Structure formats: C-alpha cells, structure tokens
Image: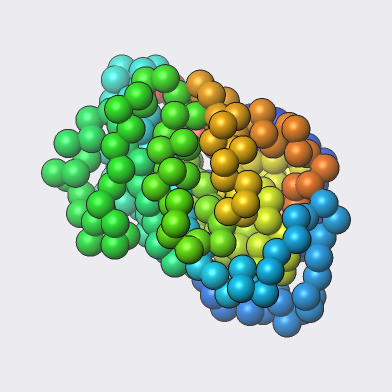
Amino acid sequence: MITAHRHASHFDAKPSGGPPGGTRTGSGAVRAYERATGPVRYAGAMARTTEDEGAPVAGLLLAAGGGRRLGGRPKALLEYRGTPLVERAARELLAGGCASVRVVLGAAAERVRARTDLAALTGHEPLVNPDWERGMGSSLRVGLGSLAGSGASAALVMLVDQPGMGAEAVARVLAAHRAGADLVAASYEGRRGHPVLFGAARWPEVAASAAGDRGARAYLQAHAGEITLVECADVASPDDIDTPEDLALLE
C-alpha cells in the first residue's frame, strides 16, 4: 500500500469524524459494520427510506484527464503494476462492493477503449465527456446524468489518478451509507478526500454546482455539517498523480 501523503486532496481538509471502519472489503465489510453498529443514523444525514437501504450503489470513476502536466499522457492509461489505472480503479470499485461502475473517459477515449475492455469488466460501455478539458466538474455531471433512473441509491465517486486508493476504502464508505448516511467521504488523518458518496436525492444539486476542476467541492463546502467522514488512512492513500515527480507513486 502507498503510504505517502504529499498532496492535498481534491477536496478541502475537514476534521475527522464518522464511524470507524474495518479492513474487510465488499459486502462482507458492510454486513460486519451493520452488525457492530446497528441501524445508526448519523447527525446531518438526510432521511432514507427502507427501499433505499437495499438499493445498489453505483461506482463512478472519473478518468477523463489529459495529464497536461504529465506532457499530455492520459491518466487513464498510466500503468500501475502492469495494469492501466482506469482498469485497476474499476476493479477496486467492484471489489469494494459497488454493484456496477460507470467510467467517464475524455482524453484519448478511443485509445483507452482499444487498450481495455471496460464494458466487459463493468457491465457498461464507458461514457465519454466531450467537454473533459473544462475540468472534473463536467465529468461528474456526465457520470451522475448517466445514473438517472438506474435505481441506484447512491453514487460512489473515485478518481483514476490515485493508485493508493483501493477496495478497503470503498468498502468503508459503503458501510457508512448502508448504516444510514447519504453523504460520506473518506478521511485521511483528518483530511477529507476520496472516495466520496452522494445519495441519489443529492445528485441534481451536486451536478448543478459542479464546475471546473473543483468537482463537487462547492457542494461539499455548503453541506459540510452533513458529511459523515470515515477514516481510511490505515488502508489507503489520497496521493494523486499530477506531475512527472508523482510518477514515482506507480513504482
């Protein structure tokens, strides 16, 4: 596991809080968490119905970046231990318990499709954001829009350029959602980061506020008191790959 913490998260730092996580992955972690805590409702969480409790959660992988500071190397095709980051991240979302994964491509989308079989892996054709150069916010809007009418209770968002992020962090965030929270974020020694989960009722407002490279930051700042934070520093790293020096994270 990558343990360095040189970069700040794409989201602002916030005090750590929320439920403690386990180290087990997937649905097993969710069941273990619920057995330990019972039907907990966290302060600030929006009310969810009984139907929501059993609804699937969709993973949303934002993988459209062109790697401008990497000399134009698309981040989705960077390799970690012999596997393109986009394929690795999709597998981690599924292993962590997401029922399905939507991948949003942008830069070099055709090359990514030719190099990987994302449709077979995730069960969905990858989405293409034609406005990817406008930043992460546009990709978030494309991804959330694709989930309308899907029946998913929430979208769990992960970024393709964080190789230290894995199934354990995904499972912890999902466990908090299954316990009642509909706005959840992983926390790294008190700093809010990814993955981030948005309940379905929040999607329209999240999409409307998403802009530029800030993604959902404005929404999260406006709803800071409603976020359930789940500590994940012991199982994941929020470091992202932006510059040539960061490529060391792939070694």
Residue at 53% over, 53% down: 155
Query: Toward the viewer: 118 or 222?
Result: 222
The answer to which of 215 and 115 lies nearer the viewer is 215
* Residue sitting at the far right: 43
Q: How is the image coloured?
A: rainbow
Seen at 73% across and 82% down, the residue is: 35
**Residue 238 drawn at (x, y percent):** 58, 41
Placement of 108 over or under 62, stated as above or below: above
Q: Position of residue 135 (x, y in %)?
A: 45, 23
Residue farthest front in this picture: 149
In which quarter of the view is residue 245 placed? top left
Instruction: Tell me if residue 218 can be seen.
Output: yes
Furthest-bottom residue in this view: 35
Q: Which residue is pictured at 29% across the width and 57% down the height? A: 124
Is 23 positioned to the left or the right of 71 in the image? Answer: right
Position of residue 57 measured from the top left corner of the image (x, y, whole percent):
52, 62
From this view, report whether residue 131 is shown above or below residue 88: above
Q: Quadrant of residue 92?
A: bottom left
Q: Image point 66% across, 62% down: which residue?
A: 177
Residue 160 placed where, x, y %? 42, 41
Residue 233 can be seen, yes or no = no
In this view, the residue farthest toward the left is: 114
